[in-house]
Image (cartoon, rainbow, N blue to C red):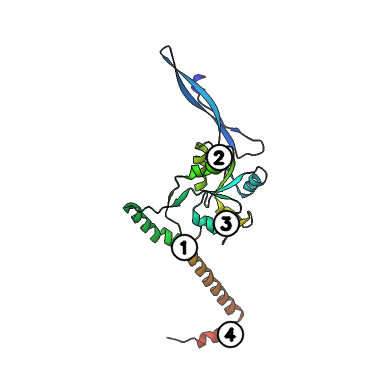
């Protein structure tokens, strides 16, 4: 029974201060040959798991624990709005390859997702890990942020495999951050940096039409006589 349980480990908390960072013991198996017999030797090591925090917890990591902010969004979202003093290391970059397959996919993308949602046609950044390594040591404390909370975990997984162990991600991304939570730079708020294309124009048109209808309703409600005169003046077909 004891031998069957040898490969099972349990997770323990790394820090009493936080309840969101854990570690799991893992082992590597090395083969050693001795007198014609193969022996297995297990070397145990501790690998830290990625921490997932909300905006307020992220602020504490930055202010108290000295975490550096790593923005892994694409260039367009970063330029619309980003946290002040962050580092920009995009996980995906714009795909400008000119092979036939890429040209067809890019054309379809730009006529649909690109047109309506303002999403660039991208590919995985092959230099992502190396770019981070050129700026930070494996012991560095990194807070990864993206727009929707999807790219930062993927980036964290790559960095963890590369030897980085002090990594945290903002749950749900910057779209869930309330205005004023972080000092930001750009033409819009952090939570709106992912909005572009015809969707934003449609949103503005809907807002204007809604305002006009509300004003018309209030005018008819409080000034019924004037409203009736205006309706009588309107041309009839």
Residue with the most extreme top position: 35
Judge whether residue 1 can be spotted in this image. Answer: no
Question: Reading the chain from its start, which is encountered first: label 1 or label 3?
Answer: 3
Using the image, determine if residue 216 lies above or below residue 199: below
Q: Position of residue 43 (x, y in %)?
A: 52, 24
The Cα atoms of the two marked residues, 4 and 3, are separated by 45 Å
On the image, numbered disc 4 is attached to which residue?
226
Which SS class for mark 4? Answer: helix
Residue 232 visible at all: yes
Tell me the residue that label 1 is attached to. 197
Circles 1 and 2 in contact, beta carbons < 8 Å: no
The residue carrying mark 2 is: 50
Residue 111, image x, y percentages: 38, 61
Q: Is residue 156 above or below residue 6?
A: below
- x then y, percent, for residue 142: 58, 43
Q: Residue 190 carries which label?
A: 3
Q: Is mark 3 on a helix, strand or loop?
A: helix
């Amino acid at each position: 029974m004891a031998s069957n349980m040898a490969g099972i480990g349990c997770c323990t908390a790394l820090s009493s201060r936080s309840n969101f960072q854990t570690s799991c013991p893992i082992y590597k198996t090395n083969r050693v040959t001795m007198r014609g017999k193969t022996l297995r030797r297990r070397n145990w090591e501790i690998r830290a798991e990625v921490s997932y925090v909300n905006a307020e917890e992220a602020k504490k990591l930055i202010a108290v624990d000295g975490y550096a902010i790593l923005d892994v969004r694409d260039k367009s979202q970063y330029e619309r709005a980003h946290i002040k003093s962050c580092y920009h290391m995009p996980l995906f970059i714009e795909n400008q390859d000119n092979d036939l397959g890429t040209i067809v996919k890019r054309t379809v993308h730009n006529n649909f997702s690109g047109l309506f949602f303002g999403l660039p046609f991208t590919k995985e950044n092959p230099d992502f890990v190396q770019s981070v390594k050129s700026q930070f040591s494996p012991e560095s404390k990194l807070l990864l942020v993206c727009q929707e909370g999807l790219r930062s975990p993927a980036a964290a997984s790559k960095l963890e495999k590369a030897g980085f162990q002090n990594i945290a991600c903002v749950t749900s991304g910057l779209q869930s951050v309330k205005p004023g939570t972080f000092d930001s730079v750009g033409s819009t708020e952090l939570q709106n940096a992912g909005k572009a294309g015809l969707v934003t124009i449609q949103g503005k048109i809907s807002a204007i039409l809604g305002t006009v209808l509300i004003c018309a309703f209030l005018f008819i409600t409080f000034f019924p006589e004037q409203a009736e005169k205006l309706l009588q003046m309107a041309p009839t077909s």
